[in-house]
Image: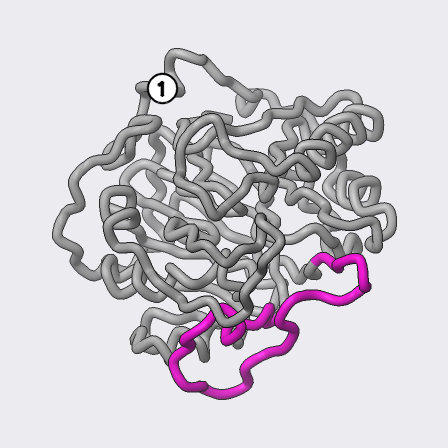
Amino acid sequence: MPSLDRRRFLRDTAATTALVTTGGLAAGAATPAHAATPAAAPTPTARRKGAVSFRWWGTAGWRVDIADRTVLVDPFLSRIDTGLFTGAFKTDTKLTVRADVIDPRVDRATTVLVTHTHWDHFMDVPYIAKRTGARVFGTLTAYHLGLAYGVPSTQLSPVKGGEVLDFGDHTVEVVGSLHSRNPSYSLAFPGVRVSQPAQPATIADLPEGDTLGYLLRVDGGPSVYFTGASDVAERNLTGLSPDVAMVALQNATTTGDYLPRLLAGLDYPKVVVPVHFDNFETALQNPPPVAPNDRTRLNDMIAAVRRISPRSRVLVPEYETAYHF
């Protein structure tokens, strides 16, 4: 297993509640939104070093501040009520973007990485892209859905896995992945969009659209792998060897050997961060709310990671807390 060396995991409790990068948010606090202007295209040859912070926004969502740039992964902040956690799931739930929740937290963004296009990963992305000028990376489905929302094609970059994108002070490697399966060996809202559809109106209008993972490598900093769903094409992970892995909670046992295959494929990361374990239809307030069944699954996941990869450190994140790896 690789050594972290200078990229050893560091978390100072006091620092996580106060230390932020330029333009970032202190844990649990919101800063006024600034007027959005389209982000300038990054210059691949410009290498800058600065503080790097990672803030969890619930579900599989992250804000990553790298010096004066901000990368968002699956930013879902509206957290609309679909009845998913109360046993009354409504597939015709209207897509309602909550600008009052998003604007204080998304003062800027240069890049948005979309793992897949289910509502709890994608529905806020078009609003954020149009507000900030951020470039959106995702599947061809994400591209066509972005067009449907009126996001300019110049801000939409379709990817499929295998691309290595250079942003100067960091690179992003796109990894082909898989969506998790439910107890019926299927998934909610399967399908892709091969052309621009009408603008989506309900959560059922946002299909899975294929699934990706992303490896973020920061110049002079950590390498971090982001998942958005709990399945894995482990052969696509060869050679990634991230320092940190953001790992989605498995919601059913129909995907065999999920954690053993994922952790082995990633060469047993030094730090494993569970994600997608919270009740994401509640306010973004700590401690993160966890449904009883998901609490059991989370505890089982932590125990499994410690058994499968005893040298890995497990960090269960809290909302909007600045972590430094």
The residue positioned 53% from the left and 47% from the top of the image is: 60
For the stretch drawn in magenta, what is the main secondary structure? loop
Q: Residue at x 24, y 57 (%)?
A: 132
Q: Amino acid at mark 1?
A: Thr
Residue 46: tell me if it is visible: yes
Q: Residue at x 77, y 31 (%)?
A: 300
Image vertical order of residue 325 relative to residue 143, above or below: above
User: As rendered, which of 231 and 155 lies closer to the eye?
Assistant: 231
In magenta, the rendered stretch is 180-209
- Is residue 185 within the magenta segment? yes
Q: What secondary structure is marked by label 1?
A: helix
Judged left or right of residue 215, residue 108 is left
Q: Position of residue 231 (x, y in %)?
A: 73, 54
Q: Quadrant of the N terminus?
A: top right
Q: Quadrant of residue 131?
A: bottom left
Res. 166 visible in picture: no
Rendered position, 155 above or below 242: below
| Magenta-span inclusion, residue 186 | yes
In terms of image quadrants, where is residue 173? bottom right
Residue 146 coordinates in the image, percent (x, y): 39, 74
| Residue 315, position as x, y percentages in the image | 60, 25
- 295 above or below 81? above
Q: Residues within 10 Å of mark 1 (few under 14, many from 20)?
A: some
Coloration of the structure image: one colour
Residue pictured at 69% horizontal, 33% vertical:
298
**Residue farthest toward the right in the current orientation of the protein:** 256
Of 287 and 146, nearer the camera is 287
Q: Which residue position holds label 1?
A: 17
Outermost residue, left direction? Answer: 35
